[in-house]
Structures are given as structure tokens and as C-alpha cells.
Image: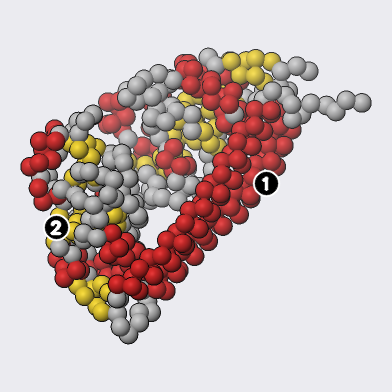
């Protein structure tokens, strides 16, 4: 039997959060709870975070008001605002569920299965369908009406089930391979970190312990205050913030650029080659980046800065700051309540292990060798991961071209 084309509205029930009433009535009758309550407000972000972060809940009264979008285990959910096309099957979370905003619930009738539609919308053909009905520039979105009008290629139920079975088996093998690669990638990173920790946990007797304030030419803080009106799209000075920091060198482009005139006014936060730029607001880890010589001028905000001067010292200090002992120092001494920060006092007092110049050079060379090996492995493993994703998409494409379940010729 040939595949038929049916509009989604003919083969499935669709609903969403706003099916329950106007925005005014929703606001009046639905109260979000951030402690466990009667029902979970199912959101795309919960799926993206692998169901591991805090849920948003609603009480029983709100749940009853949202009765038109009650979620059943196994329902298909597809995001339609912000990042349209994220699709998943509702899991069993152990309590009632109702749809959150910015997504549409799909529940197939007897002519189709939710699992089949899941794989279709994950495939190139399904992504093209969603792209074709998506509108907007600042915020991408599509609506229920256009979703229901999509023409869906539908094989007989028996073939739908065979397609899902074949895909599930293939994807289980791909996921297993990905897990092994990601484990190897983690091991490569941990090997580097282990050697780094070992170096700075077992200092030689001739190593000094000196506060950073004695080593650095100056310790200061980046600009703190409003800057948005000084941002420029082209021709400005790179303006680095915490989100731009990496555990090595700063790299262009910065997330923002500021007017050259404003840069000249921000004298204390101007950056020079071999400065250390360190995250000021912290949660789990302090991040440190070196300003490379290739950046002629730059500025920064909401970070702390150590003016070092020479490249070897900057590289040695950056490596040491990433070690466990140094991280423990900063995390144990951070201050503040609403925001916990590393300030210039804490940074200046950081007790630095300071070996002779030649030994610093030897350590940097060893760590550079380890780092290069790690990067080579990361590129290799990322290529393998990319190849597996390409294979996944190729298998999906074949499935919806009818090639995975074609009968074998006699």
C-alpha cells in the first residue's frame, strides 16, 4: 500500500496553553508554583535540560482551569516560539502534567502514532515543514492553524511501527557510540586537569609562596556600570565581559564593542597584552583568560584584572589559577550575598606558588604539550560526534523516503 498525504489536523488532535482562554483569564486563573505542587507545567526547557532541573508547577485549581491542554504520557510536544521545532514525547514524571506556553501538544488518532510523528519531525523532511511555516525575525514562531495544515506523509500503521522500530534500534547504537566518545573526551580533559592539579599540589622546596599583589604590576577591577548606550556594531573597541572568558586566551570577536571615545575614558579597565582577566561574579568555578598580544586595544566590564606584563608569568599564573588548590582558595573566599564575587582584595591576596624562572618555563612547556594533545583529541572526538549526527540524519532521511522498510526483491 502506498503512502498517503494527510493534513496533520486530520490525523491528530492539537492543543496548547492558550487554548484555555485569553491572556487575561490565564493570568487571573493560573498561578505558577516553584515548589512541588499538584501538577507539572511541562515546558520545552525541561526537555532540553533532560528533566534534571527544577520544574514549574501549578496547583489543582490552575490545573483544572487548564483542562484543554492536559498532557498524557507519550503525547508529542513541539516548540512553536523562540526555537521552533524542538520535539519530544512527554515522559512519565510521576504526577499530572499540563502544557506550558510556547509549545503545542499533538495526540495522534488511530491512523498514526506519536512515535512516528516524532521521528518525522526530527527528520530533514519534518524540519523543512516547520521551517516553511515559521515566521518572525526577533522571535521565530508558528501557529496551530499552520501546523494543522501541514501535509504529512503517512504509511500504513504496520509500516509506521516498522520504521519506528528500525530507527529506535539504529539510534540506540548511535547513542551508545556517542556515550563512549563523550566518555573519552571527558577522560582527555580530566587527564590534563589531573596533571595540572598534581604540579601545584606538590611544590618543590625552592618554590616561594607570594601573594599575587607582589607579583602583578597592578590588580584592578573592570568597569562596573551601564554601558549599553556606548555599544557600536562596527569599528569599536572590543569589550569583554564574563561570558567571553575562556580558560586560556581571550579571542575575538568579543560579544560587544564600545565607542573608542568611551574606551579612552575607561582608563582603569583598559586591557594590555598578557593581562589576566578573571571572572568576578562566580558560582562553581573561577575562569581566567590571558589577553593575547594580537589584541591591540580592548576594554572590559564585571571582571577583575591582574596586570602581569610578560607572557611566561601570565601563562604560569593562568595555569595555576585553574588548579584545584587555587580554585578552592577563590571559592572559599568569595564575598557577597545576592551575588558572590571575587574582588581585588581577594585576588591580591591569592597565595601564588612561585618557582624559579627556569622551572616555570619547564612547567609551561609540559602543560602546553598536554594541552595540545587534549585539543587534538577534542577535535578528533568532535569529528566523530559530528559524523554520528550526520549518520542519524541520513538514516532519518532514508526512513521517510521509504527506503528503510522497502521489501527485499525476490
Circle 1 sits on which residue?
Answer: 173
Instruction: Give the structural element (helix, strand or loop) at label 1.
Output: helix
- Quadrant containing the N terminus is top right
Single out the residue that lies furthest toward the bottom: 205
Of the numbered discs 2 and 1, the one sitting upstream in the chain is: 1
Q: Is residue 148 visible?
A: yes
- The front one of 353 and 112 is 353
Pinpoint residue 167: horizontal percent, then vertical percent: 68, 37
Pinpoint residue 217: horizontal percent, then vertical percent: 15, 63
| Residue at figure coordinates x 44%, y 37% from the top left | 44
Instruction: Give the structural element (helix, strand or loop) at label 2.
Output: strand
Asked which quadrant contains residue 402, the reply is top right
Asked which quadrant contains residue 265, the reply is top left
| Residue at figure coordinates x 28%, y 54% from the top left | 290
Label 1 Cα crowd, 10 Å radius (few <14 / some 14-19 / many 20+): few
Single out the residue that lies furthest toward the left: 265
Determine which of the numbered discs, if any, sits on residue 220 in the image. Answer: 2
Single out the residue that lies furthest toward the right: 410
| Residue at figure coordinates x 61%, y 19% from the top left | 152
| Residue at figure coordinates x 28%, y 40% from the top left | 254
Above or below residue 126? Residue 286 is: below
Asked which quadrant contains residue 248, the reply is bottom left
Q: Is residue 220 left or right of residue 238?
A: left
2 and 1 marks in contact (CB < 8 Å): no
Above or below residue 306? Residue 49 is: above
Q: CA distance from mark 2 to mark 1?
A: 52 Å
Amino acid at each position: 500500500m502506498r503512502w498517503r498525504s494527510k493534513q496533520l489536523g486530520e490525523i491528530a488532535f492539537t492543543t496548547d496553553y492558550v487554548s484555555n482562554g485569553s491572556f487575561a483569564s490565564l493570568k487571573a486563573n493560573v498561578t505558577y508554583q516553584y515548589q512541588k505542587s499538584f501538577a507539572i507545567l511541562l515546558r520545552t526547557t525541561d526537555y532540553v535540560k533532560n528533566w534534571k532541573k527544577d520544574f514549574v508547577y501549578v496547583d489543582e485549581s490552575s490545573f483544572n482551569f487548564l483542562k484543554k491542554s492536559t498532557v498524557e504520557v507519550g503525547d508529542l510536544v513541539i516548540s512553536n516560539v523562540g526555537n521552533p521545532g524542538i520535539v519530544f514525547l512527554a515522559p512519565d514524571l510521576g504526577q499530572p502534567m499540563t502544557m506550558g506556553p510556547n509549545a503545542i501538544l499533538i495526540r495522534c488518532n488511530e491512523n498514526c502514532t506519536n512515535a512516528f510523528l516524532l521521528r518525522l519531525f526530527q527528520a530533514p523532511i519534518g524540519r523543512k515543514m516547520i521551517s516553511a511555516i515559521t515566521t518572525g525575525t526577533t522571535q521565530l514562531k508558528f501557529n496551530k492553524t499552520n501546523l494543522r495544515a501541514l501535509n504529512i506523509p503517512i504509511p500504513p500503521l504496520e509500516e509506521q511501527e516498522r520504521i519506528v522500530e528500525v530507527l529506535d534500534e539504529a539510534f540506540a547504537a548511535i547513542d551508545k557510540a556517542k556515550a563512549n566518545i563523550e566518555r573519552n573526551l571527558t577522560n582527555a580533559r580530566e587527564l590534563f586537569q589531573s596533571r595540572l592539579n598534581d604540579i601545584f599540589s606538590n611544590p618543590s622546596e625552592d618554590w616561594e609562596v607570594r601573594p599575587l599583589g607582589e607579583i602583578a604590576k597592578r590588580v584592578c577591577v573592570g568597569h562596573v556600570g551601564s554601558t549599553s548606550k556606548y555599544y557600536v556594531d562596527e569599528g569599536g573597541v572590543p569589550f569583554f565581559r564574563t561570558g567571553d572568558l575562556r580558560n586560556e586566551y581571550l579571542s575575538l570577536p568579543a560579544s560587544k564593542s564600545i565607542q573608542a571615545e568611551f574606551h579612552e575614558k575607561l582608563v582603569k579597565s583598559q586591557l594590555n597584552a598578557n593581562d589576566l582577566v578573571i571572572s568576578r561574579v562566580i558560582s562553581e568555578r573561577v575562569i581566567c583568560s590571558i589577553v593575547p598580544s594580537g589584541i591591540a586595544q580592548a576594554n572590559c566590564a564585571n571582571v577583575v584584572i591582574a596586570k602581569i606584563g610578560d607572557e611566561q608569568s601570565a601563562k604560569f599564573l593562568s595555569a595555576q589559577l585553574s588548579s584545584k588548590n587555587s580554585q578552592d582558595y577563590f571559592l572559599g573566599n568569595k564575598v557577597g550575598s545576592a551575588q558572590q564575587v571575587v574582588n581585588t582584595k581577594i585576588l591580591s591576596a591569592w597565595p601564588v606558588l612561585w618557582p624559579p624562572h627556569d622551572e616555570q618555563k619547564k612547567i609551561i612547556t609540559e602543560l602546553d604539550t598536554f594541552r595540545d594533545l587534549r585539543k587534538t583529541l577534542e577535535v578528533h572526538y568532535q569529528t566523530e560526534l559530528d559524523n554520528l549526527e550526520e549518520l542519524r540524519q541520513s538514516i532519518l532521511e532514508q526512513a521517510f523516503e521509504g527506503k528503510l522498510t522497502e521489501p527485499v526483491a525476490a
